[in-house]
Image: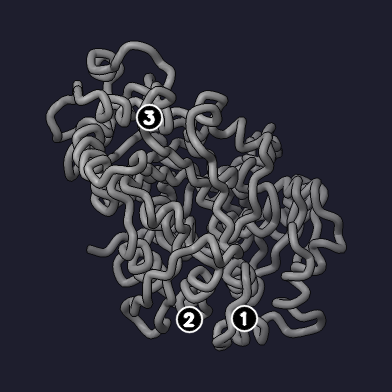
Amino acid sequence: MKVKLDYGSAGLVVDLPPDCEVIRPADAPCLPDVIGALRQAVRQPVAGPPLADLAREVLRRAAAEGGRAPRVAIAVCDSTRPHPRREVLQVFLEELAAAGAGESGVAQAGGTAEGHAPAESAAATAPPGTKPPADHLDLDITVIIATGTHRADPPELIREMLGEEVIRCCQVHVHDCRQSSDHTPLGVVSPLGDGGDIPVALDRLWVEADLRLSSGLVEPHLFAGFSGGPKLVSPGVASLETVLALHNGRRVGHPSATWGILAGNPAHDAIRAVAETCPPHFTLEVVLDSAKRVTHAFAGLPWSAHARACKVAHRTTMHPVEHRFPLVITTSGGYPLDQNLYQAIKGVSAAERIVADGGTIILAAECRHGLPDPAMYNDLLRPGEDIRLANARILASEQVVPDQWQVQVQARILARARVLVKASGLAAADLALARMEPVEDIEAFVKAARRADPGLPIAVLPHGPYCVPYFAEEILIRS
C-alpha cells in the first residue's frame, strides 16, 4: 500500500503493509473563492458588528483626538503556519478603505452556520478591483508578524508571505520578544489553577493601536488545545518574561494541557488571561484541509469566532481510534511545520496519544533548518541523564528557559516510547543530542518489524498534527 507522507515541500511516498490503519482528517470541501469567503466572513461576523462598521466607529473616535492619523495594528502568523496572509490582509485593507470612505457596502450581520461563503454570494458583495486600496487612506497601518519566541523570518520570506502591495502601503513589524523596550507593561494576571501569576508586557505597537485586528489558523495544539485566537496575542506579541511564565512546567505538564481541550486547560486559560489584557477588537480565523486549503472562515469578536472555528477543527482534524499501537508512523505535516525538530515534535506528540507503552514512533520530518538550537538540548536534556529524571526535573522547576516547553513534551514522550526520525536535514549526532535515533529507510524498518511479529498493529498519521487521533471515549472539548 502506497502512502504519501507530508515531508518537506514534496512529500515522501512509502510502501506499507495493506492492513496498516491510516488515520486521515475528515476534510471539508475547500472554499472555491477564498477572497469572497473572507469578505463575507468579515461582513457577516458570528458576533459583533461587521469589520467596516467597527472600524469606522473606532477610527472616528481616534481621528477626533486630532494631531495624528489613526493607528491600526494587524497581527498575523509567522512562517511556521500555512496561513493565507495575503488574502486576509487584502480583505482587511478593503474593509478599512470602506470604513475610511464612509460607505460600508456591507451585508447584515449573521453569517452562515459553518463559516462557508458561496462564491456567488461573495461576488455579489465584492467591491470592484482586487488590490488593497489602503495606500490612499489616512491611516497608520502596521502588520505585526506575531512570532512569539520564534526566530524572525528573513526579509525575502516576509515579502513572499505578505505580498508587494502590503509591503508598499503598510509598515511591517517583526515582533521581538527579547527587546524589552518594545513592550508596554500591563500588570499581572492570575489565571485559574496553580501555575502562578504572570507579569504581562505586550508589543507597544499592538497596545497603542486604536484598532487591533488579528487572524489565526485554528488547528489542534499539543498543549494549548487549539491554535489561533488568543495565541496571536499571547505568546504572539508578548514579551519573553510573559511567555516564559505562560509556559512553566506545571501548566504545560497538566493532564488537560493537550490537543483539543480548552475548558479546564491551564495553558489555554493562561494564554487567554494574558490576551484579555489587550485583546483584538476583531479577528478572522480560518480552518484548513490536509492540503492546506481554506475550508472555513469565522470572524467577529475574537473569542466567539475562535470558539466556532475550534468546533469545526475538532470535527475535521481529530480522529477517534479504538486501541493503542506498538508502532506509529507520523509526520509534522510537511513544510513549514517540519522546518526544524523543535517544531516537528508536534508530530511526535500527536503519535504519543495512541502509541503503546514501550512502543516505537517513527517521525518523517525534513528539518531543513536543523534542530535548530543544539545548546537548548544540551541544557535541558543533560548528557547521560535518565530521560524520566529530565522530565520530572523540568516539571518541578520554578525556572523557565526559552523553548523548554517543547523539550518537556519530548522528554515525556521519550520516557514511554522509542522515537526514530527520518530527516534529511539532521545528522545522527543532532538526533543523539535530542535522545532520538535516525532511521534512513522507513519501509525496511517496517518490514523487519513485521518479520519479527507478523500481526504487529501499525498506525500511520500521514498529516501528523493536522489530524490528531484520540480514543473514542474521551471528551476533548468540554463546555
> How far, Cα to Cα, is label 3 from label 1?
46 Å
Colour scheme of this structure image? one colour
User: In the rendered image, which residue does mark 1 sit on?
Assistant: 391
Q: Which mark is residue 250?
A: 2
Q: Amino acid at mark 1?
A: Asn
Residue under the image location 81 percent in, 83 percent down: 384
Q: Earlier in the sequence, mark 1 or mark 2?
A: 2
How many discs appear?
Answer: 3
Q: Amino acid at mark 2?
A: Arg
Residue at 68 percent across and 42 percent down: it is: 154
| Callout 3 crowding tier (Cα within 10 Å): few <14, some 14–19, many ≥20 | many
Q: Are marks 3 and 1 in contact (CB under 8 Å)?
A: no
Q: Which label sits on residue 93?
A: 3
Between marks 2 and 3 in the image, the one whose residue lies nearer the viewer? 3
Helix or strand or loop: what does disc 1 sit on? helix
- Crowding at label 2, few (<14), some or many (≥20) Cα neighbours within 10 Å? many
Mark 1 vs mark 2: give the one in front: 2
Estimate the spatial distance between the alpha carbons at disc 1 and disc 2, rounded to whole Å: 12 Å
Q: Earlier in the sequence, mark 3 or mark 1?
A: 3
- Label 3: element kind: helix
Evaluate whether residue 40 shows in this view.
no
Q: Position of residue 4 (x, y in %)?
A: 64, 36
Q: Nearer the viewer, residue 390 or 354?
A: 390
Give the CA distance from mark 2 to mark 3. 41 Å
291 shown above or below 421: above
- The quadrant of the image that shows the C terminus is bottom left
Q: Is residue 346 above or below residue 216?
A: below
Which secondary structure, mark 2? helix
